[in-house]
Image (cartoon, helix red, strand yellow):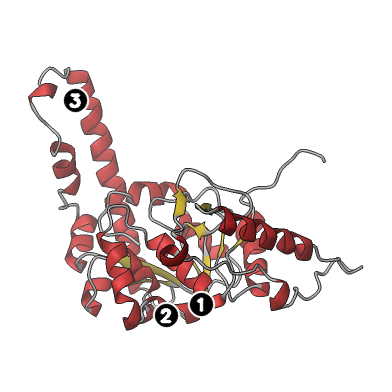
């Protein structure tokens, strides 16, 4: 998902779209564009002036003494960035026009939508597959190699397709001691039930029943004056409550719920809040619907012997 070309160089450097060609089971790549089609075509033609405008927004008299060397270096970096963005935009348009290519561009504005982060979850995307793997345009992409991370994550999703799966978790905690105790008790039960014996041939048997899955903890702000605390700088290995979109997997059946008309007030809150908490909205909603929390997977393997 993007709405301008500012992050095209980072996406190009990651070679994400070229690498995904070899991903087993991949049938479709959807690039959500939240700006007019003409903007993307302008970047591809080299006529886009976004970068010059952005670089000049903060210019003032305080920078009047900047030396020519720094100025030349900045101009050179800007020119390289523009060139990379132009080539990347050209590749996007060319692949979109190729019927044999799995990549297609979803022009949000042409479907009556606005510039909204939640467009990547819109039912109008009409994805072919049930498993939807998400990436933000700012990555990080190198944290999710297919063979060692994405493929095992998909195997985890197959066993728990009713919840959100992700590799970049964040944590929510409760302000009241009673909710914290209930949460710790539920997590203890979950840890006891998560260990599954492996069959002799190496296969993992059927997952535990729903009764042994993570217990749902209700949140009552009005009756108990509880407060949920979001920890944006912590990426817990366990006990995650919120998943960032990059590297997350979600069943396509949830799209119609995320954009249900009854939840417009929540979506509007996510749009207007200064932090744009679309990740919180999606993770909490899916947990509410499933009655279970998110599942997480490791982004790398340790080389240390235990």
- The answer to whether residue 206 is above or below residue 147 is below
SS of the residue at dot 3?
helix
**Residue 43, horizontal then vertical, whole percent:** 22, 55
- Tell me which label, 3 or 2, sits earlier in the chain: 3
- Residue situated in front as seen by the camera: 25 or 228: 228
Q: Residues within 10 Å of mark 3 (few under 14, many from 20)?
A: few
Q: Quadrant of residue 111?
A: bottom left
Left or right side of 174 for 295:
right
- Tell me which label, 3 or 1, sits earlier in the chain: 3
Q: Tell which tag, 3 or 2, sits nearer the viewer.
A: 2
Circle 2 residue? 257
Q: Which quarter of the rendering shows the N terminus?
A: bottom left
**Residue 180, horizontal then vertical, whole percent:** 59, 55
How many callouts does the rendering have?
3
Using the numbered discs, state the Cα–Cα distance from disc 3 to disc 2 in whole angstroms: 50 Å
SS of the residue at dot 1?
helix
Using the numbered discs, state the Cα–Cα distance from disc 2 to disc 1 in whole angstroms: 9 Å
Q: Residue at x 88, y 69 (%)?
A: 199
SS of the residue at dot 2?
helix
Left or right side of 141 for 277:
left
Q: Residue at x 46, y 71 (%)?
A: 285
Left or right side of 36 for 29:
right
Circle 3 residue? 71
């Amino acid at each position: 998902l993007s709405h301008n070309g500012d992050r095209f160089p980072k996406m190009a450097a990651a070679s994400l779209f070229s690498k995904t060609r070899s991903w087993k089971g991949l049938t479709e790549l959807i690039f959500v564009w939240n700006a007019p089609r003409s903007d993307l075509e302008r970047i591809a033609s080299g006529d886009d002036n976004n970068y010059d405008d952005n670089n000049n927004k903060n210019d003032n008299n305080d920078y009047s003494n900047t030396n020519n060397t720094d100025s030349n270096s900045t101009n050179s970096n800007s020119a390289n960035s523009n060139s990379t963005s132009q080539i990347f935009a050209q590749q996007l348009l060319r692949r979109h026009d190729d019927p044999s290519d799995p990549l297609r561009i979803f022009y949000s504005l042409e479907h009556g939508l606005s510039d909204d982060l939640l467009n990547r979850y819109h039912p109008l995307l009409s994805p072919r597959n049930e498993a939807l793997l998400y990436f933000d345009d700012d990555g990080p992409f190198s944290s999710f190699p297919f063979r060692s991370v994405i493929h095992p994550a998909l195997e985890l999703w197959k066993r728990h397709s009713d919840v959100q799966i992700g590799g970049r978790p964040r944590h929510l905690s409760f302000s009241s001691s009673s909710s914290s105790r209930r949460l710790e008790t539920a997590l203890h039960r979950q840890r006891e039930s998560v260990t599954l014996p492996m069959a002799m041939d190496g296969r993992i048997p059927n997952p535990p029943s729903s009764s042994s899955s993570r217990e749902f903890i209700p949140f009552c702000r009005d009756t108990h004056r509880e407060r949920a605390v979001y920890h944006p700088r912590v990426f817990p290995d366990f006990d995650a409550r919120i998943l960032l979109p990059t590297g997350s997997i979600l069943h396509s059946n949830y799209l119609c719920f995320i954009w249900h008309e009854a939840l417009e007030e929540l979506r509007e809150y996510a749009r207007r809040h200064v932090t744009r908490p679309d990740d919180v909205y999606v993770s909490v909603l899916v947990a509410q619907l499933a009655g279970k929390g998110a599942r997480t997977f490791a982004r790398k393997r340790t080389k240390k012997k235990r």
